[in-house]
Each structure stands twice: as C-alpha cells, then as structure tokens.
C-alpha cells in the first residue's frame, strides 16, 4: 500500500510517501495507524493524536474505521486550510 | 452544465473567466464571483506557500461543485485554486456561479466556499520575519457547514 503524508505531518515524519506491505492483522485505517506508529519516534509523534489527523483512502475523505487493502493509497494530513 | 475546475500555479483573470462562462449562453441572469486573496494581518507576512494533494484536489473540488449543482439550478460553475508560493494581495481562489436568478448563484457560491474551506486538501504555510508556520484550521469554518445540513 502507498502511504502519503502532507503538510505538518509530512515535515514531522520527514518524508512525503512510503510503500509498505499490508500486515495481515491490519484491516482498518485505525489498525494501519497503530502499525505506522511503530516505525519511528517521528511516526509515533505525528500520528499520536488522531484528533488532529485527517485521512483519505484512494483520494476520498475517510474515517478511522474505513477498511484498507494492499492496493490502497492512504493519505494522512492535518485539517485543511485552503481557500 | 459541467463545472470547470482548475488547480494551478498561475494567476487568473476574473473578467476573462466570467466572459468564458457566458459564451453562447442566454439563460444566465445572475453571475456571482468570490475571490480569496492573501492577507497580511500586520504580522509582516512575506509569503504564503500552499501545498496540496494533487491526485485528490481536483476530484474533491469536482465533488463539491457537483453537490452544489444538485442543490441549485446552476447554468455555470467555475472554480480555480492556486498552489505554490504567493504574496500579500495575490489571488488564491476563484469561485464563479451562474444561474437564471441571483439567489441560487449567491447561495451556491457560498456553499462551494464553505465546503472548499473544510474539505479541499490544501494547506497554507505563512512565512514572516520570525520564520515559517503552518496556518491552523479555523473552528468557524467547521461551524459554517452546519447551515447547509439538509
């Protein structure tokens, strides 16, 4: 699966994307977040408070209980500030 | 009517955009436009950088425009949002709605901006003499959505 990070989350993690294999026990975005937090202290800090993290699955806004598959593009970003 | 959406580095000309929307159309009685610009709140803003999610941005703006089209009888809809480095006074976003009557055009433009502010994947970073800082999301933007609940 393709993981994307934007804005402050991208800066905290220090990369804009990474490709990972979906572990068998990762079924939802929430499971994926728990998995990603184990990657590094920066991942842990950036994804610690999901109150401030927005999610998109395959370029559509999604909630933490959204199911994920190995071919998905999952993006994590802070609340948007365009306009 | 197919909404026209652009996400671009370049500036836009509002007069040109309105004229293009009206070409060969005689059922339009009202055109409403909104332009959002870079402001400097006396903080010494030197520039603002807009990041976005290229694969998602146009699709999300199209979803918002489609929803507006389903709620109001629009004859034209144009959205342009810029990204990259911008300076105080620069244009950021343009929304144009056209309809037979003004109320639909006003309401649809308002609706599109409210949803764009909370759903379109853009992030602003402000640079001042003290450094660069991401702009915090505004609670008032979330509240603005409540009035559109059906």
Image: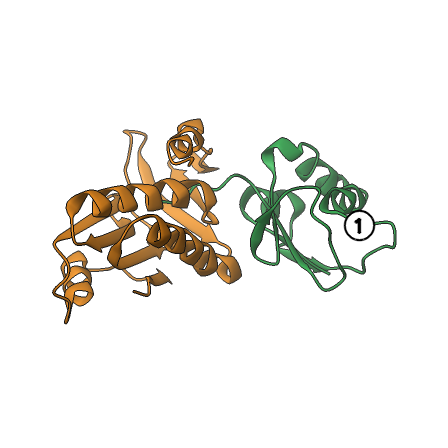
Tell which residue pokes out farthest to the bottom in this image: B24
- Residue located 55% across and 40% down the image: A78
Tell which residue pokes out farthest to the right in this image: A24
Query: In terms of secondary structure, where does tag 1 sit?
Result: loop
Say how many tags the image has: 1
| Chain A on-screen colour | green
| Chain B on-screen colour | orange
Where does residue B148 sit, x and y in percent of width and height? 38, 36
Where does the C terminus of chain B fall, quadrant-wise? top left
Where does the N terminus of chain B fall, quadrant-wise? bottom left
Q: Relative to A79, is A9 on the left or the right?
A: right
**Label 1 environment density (alpha carbons within 10 Å; few <14, some 14–19, many ≥20):** some
Where does residue B110 sit, x and y in percent of width and height? 29, 41
Q: Please identify the quarter of the rendering in which residue A34 is found.
A: top right
Where does residue B32 sit, x and y in percent of width and height? 18, 48
The foreground one among B133 and B110 is B110
Residue B37 seen by the camera: no
Residue B107 seen by the camera: yes
> Mark 1 = which residue?
A27
Q: Chain of mark 1?
A: A
């Amino acid at each position: 699966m393709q993981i994307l990070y934007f804005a402050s989350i991208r800066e905290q993690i220090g990369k804009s994307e990474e490709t990972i294999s979906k572990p068998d026990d990762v079924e939802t975005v929430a499971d994926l977040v728990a998995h990603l937090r184990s990657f590094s202290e920066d991942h842990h800090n950036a994804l610690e408070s999901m109150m401030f993290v927005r999610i998109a699955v395959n370029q559509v806004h999604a909630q933490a209980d959204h199911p994920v598959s190995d071919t998905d593009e999952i993006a994590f970003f802070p609340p948007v500030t365009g306009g | 009517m197919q909404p026209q959406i652009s996400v671009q580095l370049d500036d836009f000309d509002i007069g040109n955009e309105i004229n293009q929307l009206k070409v060969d159309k005689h059922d339009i009685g009202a055109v409403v436009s909104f332009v959002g610009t870079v402001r400097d709140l006396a903080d010494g803003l030197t520039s603002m950088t807009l990041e976005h999610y290229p694969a998602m941005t146009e699709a999300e703006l199209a979803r918002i425009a489609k929803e507006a089209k389903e709620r109001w009888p629009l004859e034209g809809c144009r959205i342009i949002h810029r990204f990259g480095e911008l300076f105080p006074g620069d244009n950021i976003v343009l929304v144009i709605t056209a309809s037979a009557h003004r109320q639909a055009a006003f309401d649809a433009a308002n609706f599109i901006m409210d949803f764009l502010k909370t759903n379109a994947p853009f992030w602003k970073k402000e640079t001042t003499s003290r450094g660069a800082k991401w702009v915090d999301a505004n609670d008032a933007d979330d509240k603005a959505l409540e009035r559109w609940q059906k």
